[in-house]
Amino acid sequence: MTRRITVFLVVCLVIGAVVAVYYMPRWQAQQTQAGAKGSKGGGAGRPSAEKVPVLAATAKTADVPVYLDGVGTAKALNTVTVRPQVDGKLINISFREGQDVEKGYILAKIDPVTYQAAYDQTVAKKQQDEAQLANARLDLERYTRLAASNAVNKQQLDTQKALVNQLEAQVKLDQATIDNARAILSYTDVIAPISGRTGIRQVDEGNIVHASDATGIVILTQLRPISLFFSLPQQELPDLTRGLAEGPLPVDALGGDGKTPLDRGKVVVIDNQVDQTTGTVKLKAEFPNTDLQLWPGQFVNVRVLIDTLRNVVVVPTAAVQRGPNGTFVYVLKDDSTVTVRRVSVSQQDDVQAVVAEDLQAGERVVTTGFGRLTEGTAVTVSSAEGAGQVAPAAPRPDGARGKRGGERGKRSSSAGGPPANNP
């Protein structure tokens, strides 16, 4: 009897094990499917904490200026090394270092005593010759009357006429000598040939100066307006010449950070040849320099406005990602999920990017939180504008040029790409 019970129990255990092995996988699969359906239906299948938090911004239409960036050197519009034109003792210096002076201002005075004496001599010599000329003319009149009555011979009359002509020429020579002496005397006043700012004084009062001195007395520079020379690649030459033919090209001078505006001017000339060693062309711009933000010899970042893209779709630069297949953005769908969309970027800077195709104004794109995103990922969205990530749109610069758009200034983003199964 005990043996029968033992056999029965063994048979029951075997049957239970077979049933468990056969039905357990099916039961687990059913439970998994039920959990997935509950998650899609908003039930307790997938908790809301698994949604990825992101920041998003709205694609907009705007007019985007196109700039060419370069580095230039400021140079005074006019620079003069003021040198004495005569030798002598420097008896007076009437300017302060760093003073703004007008054209014709007397900068210094050289001892005029010897030059005044030379001038007085020439004046006296002319007076002497004029007296001789007056007497010769009187004699000529007498000889002319006597020759009419044959009281004197014709030879004496001709000789007197020659003497008068000789003295007239001598008086003219004296006048030229006076003019020269007067000019030399005026050189004892060292005047400013242009309006500008004086530099550091090169010689002190009381020294003997010479016209051959290389250093001069002071260097005078014109700071308002001021010029700036910079170079751009020769590939941009067609756009530059076309833009300059339409009107002056606006130029912005920027500070060392490349953002702070110092002054705004215009391109006045493009050099007539390309530098073959560097493949660049030199340009000259002119700035009013009202606030003296530009200084001769200063290195300045410049940007030239050559185009304006009209009514284009723009997104924050942070939204543009780069992957194996090119640039793309994460676009928010109505069900709070994201989709990967490839885009073509035609213009990009550190603030915004121009999307040429495949994105419409009003669509929202992710700007932060890409690390856990894939196709169809559910997200919780905050506004990038509210978080201060997206700067307000800058107003269109004055003198913006409405020409055709182009592939200029394109920069790649450093963010990672999408998974390999995404486009």
Image (spheres, grey):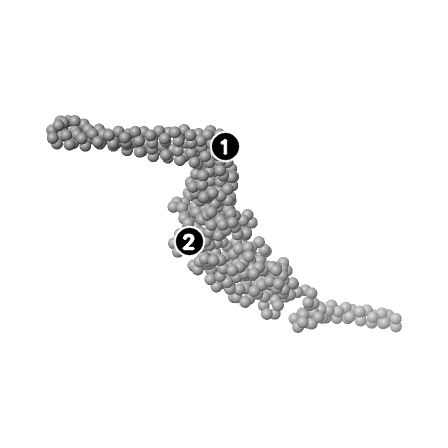
Quarter of the figure with residue 389: bottom right
Amino acid identity at mark 1: Glu
Residue 205, disc: 1
Q: Quadrant of residue 320?
A: bottom right
Q: In this rendered view, identify the residue nearer to me: 182 or 74.
A: 182
Above or below: residue 387 compared with residue 212: below
Front in this rendered view, residue 223 or 306: 223
Q: Nearer the viewer, residue 35 or 251?
A: 251
Label 1, residues with CA under 10 Å away: few <14, some 14-19, many ≥20? some
- The mark lying in front, picked from 2 and 1, is 1
Q: Residue at x 69, y 65 (%)?
A: 49
Local crowd at mark 2 within 10 Å, few (<14), some, or many (≥20)? some
Work out whether residue 348 can be spotted: yes
The local secondary structure at tag 1 comes to loop
Mark with earlier residue (2, 1):
1
Place of residue 143 in the rendered image (x, y in percent of width and height, measured from the top left): 17, 30
Dots 2 and 1: beta carbons under 8 Å?
Answer: no
Quick check: 182 left or right of 37? Answer: left
Horizontal and vertical percent position of residue 237: 41, 50
**What residue is rendered at 73% in x and 69% in y?**
24
Circle 2 is placed at which residue position? 248
Task: Tell me what residue is drawn at x 45 percent, y 53 percent.
Answer: 250
Q: Nearer the viewer, residue 83 or 413?
A: 83
